[in-house]
Structure formats: C-alpha cells, structure tokens
Image: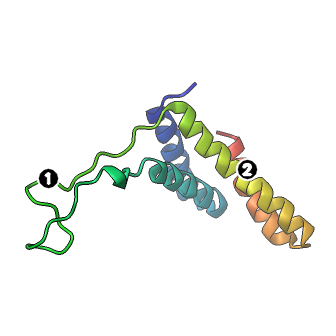
Amino acid sequence: MRTVDEWKAVLRAALKEAMRTRNTQATAALRATLAAIDNAEAADLSVAPAAVLGGFAGSAGGLGSGEVARLVLTPEAVRAVVDREVQERRDAVALYTQLGRTDEARAVQAQLEVLLAL
C-alpha cells in the first residue's frame, strides 16, 4: 500500500500530466481528489485556542498561539477519500444515464476512469 506522501506524489504527477496534455476531465478529477485529501487533513477547530479581546477581532494572544496542527492521515484514510471520490462519480454517471444526459455521463465517466487508473 502507498504511503500518504506517495499518494499525493502520484496524484500531483498525474495532475501535472493532465494539465500538460490539456485533459480537462482528468484535471478536474485529480484536483477534486487532492482538494478532498486536503480537506480531510483540515485542523480540528475544537482544539483551537479561544479568542482574546483586544488587538484584532477573533485573534489569540501571543505569536503562534492561534495555530492548530493539521490532522495526519493514514494511508488507509487517504485510500478511503479516493474511494469516496470514485463512488461519487459512479453515482453521478448512474444518475446522468438515468436522466438521459449522455454528454454529462460521458464526462463524469472519463473522470471516473482517471481515478480508477490510480
């Protein structure tokens, strides 16, 4: 299984290639997947320091005191994010097909194939 850094490197390399070849569907799928991973790593704000009055609105006192560490994902968590992106596209293809919107279904199918190739 890939490490988190390997996942990100593979996705970024594929994104770079998709952008170079102007493959809009691949670019969209890869950007969305990288964004989903970044969102999953977002800091837990429940552990953020409380805001203090004075100075700037909503600021915490002292240099660096308002910083909260990002979450560290496991390789399994990253794989789950990628799997969720794949499932979203499968559902969208099925819905577009059911609605008779073949152009949209083909576009999302292209995105799905990019993610399945990872």
* Quadrant housing residue 66: bottom left
- Neighbours of disc 1 within 10 Å: few (<14), some (14-19), many (20+): few
Looking at the image, residue 80 lies above or below residue 42: above
Q: Amino acid at mark 1?
A: Gly
* Residue type at tag 2: Gln
| Residue to which mark 1 is pinned | 64
- Horizontally, is 98 left or right of 9 in the view? right
- Between 62 and 13, the one lying in front of the other is 62
Residue displayed at 39% across by 43% down = 71
Q: Position of residue 40 (x, y in %)?
A: 48, 49
Quadrant of the image containing the C terminus? top right
- What is the CA distance from the residue labelled 2 to the residue labelled 1? 39 Å
Residue 68 on image: x %, y %: 27, 50
Image x and y of residue 115, in percent: 67, 46
Mark identifier at residue 75: none
Say which of marks 2 and 1 sits in front. 1
Estimate how packed mark 2 is, as few (under 14), some (14 to 19) or many (20 or more) residues with alpha carbons within 10 Å: few
Q: Is residue 11 left or right of residue 115?
A: left
Secondary structure found at label 1:
loop
Secondary structure type for disc 2: helix
The residue identified by callout 2 is 87
